[in-house]
Image (cartoon, rainbow, N blue to C red):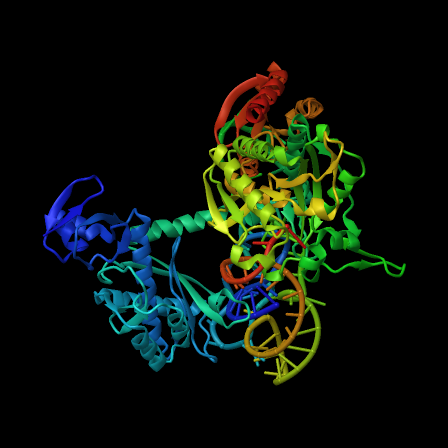
Amino acid sequence: MIKITFPDGSAREYNKGISSLDVAELISPRLAKEVYAATVNGEIWDLMRPINSDATLKLHKWEDAEAKHAFWHSSAHLMAEALESLYPGMKFGIGPAIENGFYYDVDPGNDKVITEDDLQTIENKMKELAAMNLTYSRRDISKKEALDFFSKKGDEYKTELISELTDGTITLYTQGNFTDLCKGPHLPSTAPLKAIKLLSVAGAYWRGNENRKMLTRIYGITFPKQKLLDEYLVFLEEAKRRDHRRIGKELELFTFSPKVGMGLPLWLPRGSDIRQNLITFLTKELRKRGYKIVTTPHIGNVNLYKTSGHFEKYGADSFQPISTPQEGEQFMLKPMNCPHHCEIYNATPHSYKDLPYRMAEFGTVYRYEQSGELHGLTRVRSFTQDDAHHFCRPDQLREEFKSIIDLILYIFKILNFNNFTAQVSLRDPANKQKYIGSDENWEKAERDIIEAAAEKNLETTVVIGEAAFYGPKLDFMVKDAIGRKWQLGTIQVDYNLPERFELTYNGNDNQKHRPVMIHRTIFGSMERFVAVLIENTAGKFPLWLAPEKAVILPISEKFNDYAGKVLEILNNSDICTLIDDRSEKIGKKIRDNELKKIPYLLIIGEKEVENESIAVRKQGEGDKGSMKVSEFVNFINSEIKKEIAF
RNA sequence: GCCGAUGUAGCUCAGUUGGUCAGAGCAGCUGAUUUGUAAUCUGCAGGUCGGGGGUUCGAAUCCCUUCAUCGGCUCCA
C-alpha cells in the first residue's frame, strides 16, 4: 500500500501502482470525468501513469492551467495525427500547448502549401479521430531507439531535437497511428476533445531562427464542451471590436497613409486632443516632482551615436544617415533621446548637491522597424516617447529608482490600468558579448533593480537575456484586446553612457565623479499608450481625456439660437463642446452622438429655452435631468478634478 | 525581412464557373419635415473594382509584377 496526500492535507491509502485517474474515480466517478491531469510530488503527470510510492497528489480540473495544458497538448498531437493521415510524408517540428490553445509547426514538403482553406478539412479529420476515443500511451525509450524510429520515418526535425536530449529521459506518446516525441503529460484518451476549432495558419522559423527553414504553423483551440468553444469565439469577436485600429478609424483618432509611409502615424484632431491631454497632465505631474523639461532636435550628428555606441550596435538596421551638400557631414534621425540629453547635462557643471538631475522630454524618435512588424499604433516607425533621464549619484540610485516605480504606479492608477505585469530584464550571462559595460556595474545594477522592486512590493517576473545592451531594466507590460503583450513603461539603469559621454559632477571632496543614469518612460510612447488606452476603454475615454466633453442637440431648428449661446458659454469655459444642429429628429441625433462616445449630450427644446437650462444626458447612461449652464460648467470641472486628483 | 492571406464608393460589405456586374446599406449633398431622449421621408452624387503589365472577342473575376493591409515568425536601442 502507498499513502497519497491531498492538497487539503488529508491522506488515504491505495494499492501500489494506482493511477491518478483511479484515485479520482474512487473519490467520485464524476470527478474522474472532470480531471485532465495531476500533479504528483510536484511534477505534472498523465492521469494514467502508475504511482508506485507515497506521494502528494493534486488533481487538475479544467479550471487549472495544468489541465488546459494537457488538454491542448493532446489536441496538438491529435492535429498531427490528422495531418499525417491527410498529408502522408509531412514532417513535424514542435507542437506545444500555449496560453490559449495549441499549435503545431509542420513541414508539408516543398511543393505543398497549407492555407486557411484547408483548416476545415483538417478539423473534420480531427473530429473523426477524436470520436474514435483513442488512448494516449506513454513509452520510455532509449536515445538510439528514438533516433532510429524518427530517421526511419524521415523526420529530420525530430531527430535534431532528440540528438540534443540526454539518454534515459526520452519518452514517446502514441495515440491511434501517430507517435510523437514528447515529455507529456497527456489526456488518457481523445474522448474529451469534443469541441475543436482550427484558428489560423502562419509561417514560423524552425527553432525561431530566421536563418533556418520556415515551417507552417497551424493554430487551434479545443474545449471539453461546445458551449465553451462558442463562448471563446464570441470573446474573440468582441475583442476584435475593441481593436484600436478599428476604433481609431471609427472615432477619427488617427490614420496612416501609404503616401506618407508605412508605420508613420497621422494623428487626426480628436486623437491629437487625447494625446495632448495626456501630455499636459503628465507635464504638470513631472514639474511637481522636480523634473526639468527640455527640447531637442529630431536629428543628430552621426558622431553623437558613435560616441553613445548606438551606431555600432544598431547603425546598420536604422534609417540610414542623412547626407548634406557639405562633404563629410552626416546626420541621423534620432532613434532615442539619451545622447542629446547627455549633452544637455554636459552643458553645465554639476555639484553633488544638485543631483539627481531629472530631465524630461516628449521626444519624437524614428526607428526602422521591419515592415512585417508594424502594427497599428503599437509598433510604428515614428513615435513620441515620454522620455526622461535621471542623472544621480550612485548612492541615490536605489531611492531614485523607487521614486520612478511610485510615479508609474500612480499614473497607471489614475488611468485605471490594473492588468499590467512587471518584468525584470537581466542580461544573459552566457552571452556577454551582446552587452557593454563591466561585470561589476552589471551586477550592481541588477541587484539595485531587484531590490528596489522588492522594497516597493512589486510583483515581478525575472527574464534572463531581455536587458537593454547597456543595462538591466524593469518593464511594465500590458495585454491588448486579443492578448498580445506590449511593453509600456520601462526603467533602465545605465552606467555606460555617463562613461562614454564623460559626464561628471563635483563631489564634496572637490573631485570629479561619474553619475549614474536612469532611462525611464511611463507611457512608453504616446502612440502605444493611446492604443492600449483605446482598447482598455473601447473608445469611451474618461471625461478629462475626451476630445469633446459635450455635444448640444437642439430638438428643432427653432432652438438653434439658444443652443448657439450655450455652445459659446461652454467653449469659453474651456469645456470643448460641439453642436448637432442638423434637421434630424432628436432620437437620431442622440443615437449618432452616443455612438461617437461623447461623454455628455445636452438636449435643448422649448422647456430649456424658457428656464435657461439644458437637459443633460450622460453617454451610455441616459437622461440625468436638467441644469443651468453654469451648474453644468461646475459639474464638469468637478468631475474632471475627481478623475485626475488622487 | 520571411511564410500565408486579403485589397470593390468616405465606412461596412454583395458581386456563382470571365459575358448589361459596377451594386446595397450607412455617411455626404438636395428638398420636404420642425421633431422631447438610440435610426423621418424624397431625390442626387460617389468607384478606371489598390497601381502597372499580360492572356482573351471580352477581365472586378485568370496570370505576372508592384504597393499596402491582416495573421504569425524574426526583430524591438
Question: Which residue of the protein is positioned furthest toward the top in this rendering?
Answer: A611
Q: What residue appears at the point 66 percent right and 43 percent down from the top-left corner? A: A385
Quadrant of the snapshot with the C terminus of chain A: top right
Q: What residue appears at the point 33 percent right and 49 percent down from the top-left corner? A: A65
Q: Residue A100: horizontal and vertical position, in percent?
A: 39, 53
Q: Residue A290: horizontal and vertical position, in percent?
A: 68, 28
Number of marks in the image?
0
Q: Is residue A44 above or below residue A409?
A: below
Q: Nearer the viewer, residue A147 or A644?
A: A147
Q: Nearer the viewer, residue A464 or A45?
A: A464
Left or right: A550 as drawn, with respect to A122: right
Find residue A434 and report its image quarter.
bottom right
Left or right: A96 as drawn, with respect to A54: right
Q: Nearer the viewer, residue A423 or A612?
A: A423
Query: Is residue A531 something one can see in this rendering?
Result: yes
Question: Which residue of the protein is positioned furthest toward the front in this rendering?
Answer: A509
Q: Residue A318: horizontal and vertical position, in percent?
A: 69, 58
Question: Which residue of the protein is positioned furthest toward the right in this rendering?
Answer: A326
Q: Is residue A256 above or below residue A207?
A: above
Q: Nearer the viewer, residue A11 or A175?
A: A11
Query: Is residue A253 something one can see in this rendering?
Result: no
Q: Residue A47: horizontal and vertical position, in percent?
A: 21, 56
Find residue A84 and report its image quarter.
bottom left
